[in-house]
Amino acid sequence: MTTALTIEADPYILPLPGPDSPVVMDRWISPGNTHPNSRYSDDIWSMGPLTDNPGTSIHKINWRSCPATLRSEFRRIVWVLINGELRPTYVQERGFQNRARDGVISMRDNIVQWMKFARWLDRQGVSQLSDCTIEHWKAYAAENTSGCTRDYTRTVLCWLSDLSAFDQLSISPCGATRPPWEDEGIDDYLPAETAEAGGENKTEPLDPTVIGPVLTWSIRLVEDFSEDILAAWAERRSMHARVKATPSTRGGLAAVKIYLQPLVDSGAPLPATVSRLHGVTLAHHYVAAVTGASWNQVHFFASRRGLRELTARRPGPSPLQVPVTGQVEGRPWREFMDYEETPILVRHLATAAAIVILYLTGMRPQEAQSLRSGCCPDPEANPDGSTPRHLIRSHHYKNVRDSDGHHVSAGEERAVPWVAITPVVNAIRVLERIVPEGELLFSSTHHDVVARRKHHGALKRSSLGRRVEALVSWINQEAIAQGLPTQQVPEDPHGNLGLSRLRRTLAWHIARRPGGLVALAIQYGHMRTALDARTSTGYGSRARRGFHGELDVETALAAAQTAARLRDATAAGEKISGPAARRALIGATSIPGFEGALTTPKAAAKFLARDGLILFDNPDAFLICAFKRDTALCDPDPGATAPNQFACQLGCGNAVRTDSHAQSAREHADRLDTKAALVPQPLGDRFRLTADRFRALADAHDSAAQSAEEAIA
């Protein structure tokens, strides 16, 4: 029997908790955590004391979902999971999990699997863990991992193994049996390996036709409409406060009658709002604020005259007395700001700011969720009068651990800040006007713009995802209303605009579409320059490469595809020209040795480091760049592994063209000539000069083109 002496001799053994014992022991609660701690006997346990990340929901364990016969045993082991640490010997044996204690999200996922197992055991008539046999383990593993990927199956089986491992850390173990894969080896319980490369990011980037208008409208909301929206929001809140403080007087009721009766008698629309209970009804708060009456007096008058039904038949706007300064295509975007529309616009404005920040910095969603007011101060001018870039200082969370290797829910401040270009700074400034000083920029409480309910932390990813979809719907309605149907957002072929897709899309487009459709709002050359300032910011000098690692993977994959296309084109008989033709063909033939391996930042960086052999397609310049730093005319940074494709120069020694490039250049020249005939002469002359330049490039290719065999000889 295990005794108190055993606990003292073995620090990994935990005592039995009592009914009033806290679910989370004090040692695991950070000093700033104020979430209430549940008691062991509670039916619902909160994981709040372990949650310091503002972007993470407060997860709960509901013991009513665990079978009554097994509840006491599983409750004891879950408590040990929350408060215990796996023995180093056990961790070392399991090379695929190199930590003794996980974060709250992993704990939650683990507990979910244990609960499923408990319910399955209950259906098999097993009422205590010591009666679970090897046959039970095998049957459960076969039934509940069928159709799962190999990696996910491995994770599930490891979580199940933890059940017996944590049980052994209790002073009074339940006797949970050891799964057979712990003794026989896990490989026989996993599905077969597939040909897919491990570690590949399968998140699909957003289509250019989708991200273009989304980004354009988001920046438009932030930079052109925000003053109007925030002014209307301030006026609405002021009116609402006045109504709340206004008592009922005889003059107030008379003012309501003077305001509403002429509208009723003339058949004019009535100021309307949409109520969850009553649908379209009279805007009581608006009418009360305009007339100086109390809300009760408006309600009394409306009820007596049947205005709820009348308003549903004749709904009208609720104009605010604030100026409209924002414009679309040179005209005001609103005739007036509307009292009832304002909360919706504030919500869309905040969502637009989130898109701008997430997309144009490459932040992970949880990193953006932790941003606070004041995170991006205006920099002081340099002695020479130049102004440094704005820097964003905040926390990151991925793989943040303390000296004992334990996950740190609160994350840590990044040693190197993000670089913020102007649209990002503008978005932060807008959010700083919505939330109080020092508050989270995406505070759940302050972005609940009407009720201001006391929510935990920042808006969660699910909420932000729904808000993005709502913004897209609003953009499409607004584009039609503004007579701009070409600026609608089409459906993306891969589904909803998930937040994780924004980060992937930025890397994809910077690597593959410099100066492309996405540059409707931002010139990508400037964006890449800001992100690639590795020497000055040290952003890429850390072991964990962050967004640059993702950018390197996309760049490497794009270069590999360019090389494969060149190899296929020359094999099909296309000719090649340019000072770097021979080098490009050598680079193209080396690609098969790398195919399937360019899925990690480390592999991508190694591939891109082969100076002179990496090929970058530049469709805007109608060429391939066989990038070599010493001969590049695009002024690459020292140590750069990719060209500044937006600064491609004629006469560069890295240029390569094929017959397809020459044909595309001629087709583009023809399009420019067509445009030249439709515009004023000075602009038309410039179009014609550019067209002649592209035809000259195509002619030069034709005169110098060689077959692949001739070029490489």
Image (spheres, helix red, strand yellow):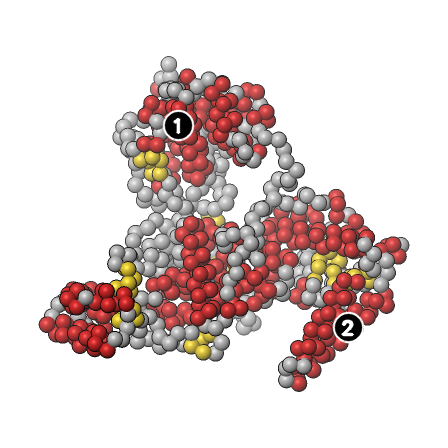
| Residue 466, x across and y down, in percent | 42, 54
Give the mark nearer the N terminus: 1 vs 2: 1
Please state, as top left, top right, bottom left or bottom right, where the N terminus lies in the image: top left
Residue 52 sits above or below residue 632 on the image: above
Q: In percent of the image, x 73 and y 79: which residue is there?
A: 689
Please state, as top left, top right, bottom left or bottom right, where the C terminus lies in the image: bottom right
| Residue 529, x across and y down, in percent | 61, 62
Report which residue position mark 2 lands on.
695
Q: In percent of the image, x 68 and y 57: which residue is there?
A: 642
Q: Nearer the viewer, residue 328 or 449?
A: 328
Q: Secondary structure at mark 1?
A: helix
User: At label 1, which amino acid type do we have?
Assistant: Arg
Q: Residue furthest left?
A: 250
Q: Secondary structure at mark 2?
A: helix
Q: In the rendered view, does 596 fall on the left or right side of 66?
A: right
Question: How far is mark 1 from mark 2, CA to CA?
Answer: 73 Å
Q: Residue furthest top?
A: 1
Q: Is residue 143 visible?
A: yes
User: At label 2, which amino acid type do we have?
Assistant: Arg
Q: Nearer the viewer, residue 237 or 530?
A: 237
| Residue 49, x across and y down, in percent | 35, 40
Q: Is residue 13 visible?
A: no
Residue 18 sits above or below residue 425 on the image: above
Residue 114 sits above or below residue 547 on the image: above
Q: In the rendered view, does 143 fall on the left or right side of 14?
A: right
Q: In percent of the image, x 40 and y 30: which residue is there?
A: 115
Quadrant in the rendering for residue 154: top right
| Labelled disc at residue 37 | none
| Residue 702, x across and y down, in percent | 83, 67
The count of marks equals 2
Residue 632 sits above or below residue 694 on the image: above
| Labelled disc at residue 119 | 1
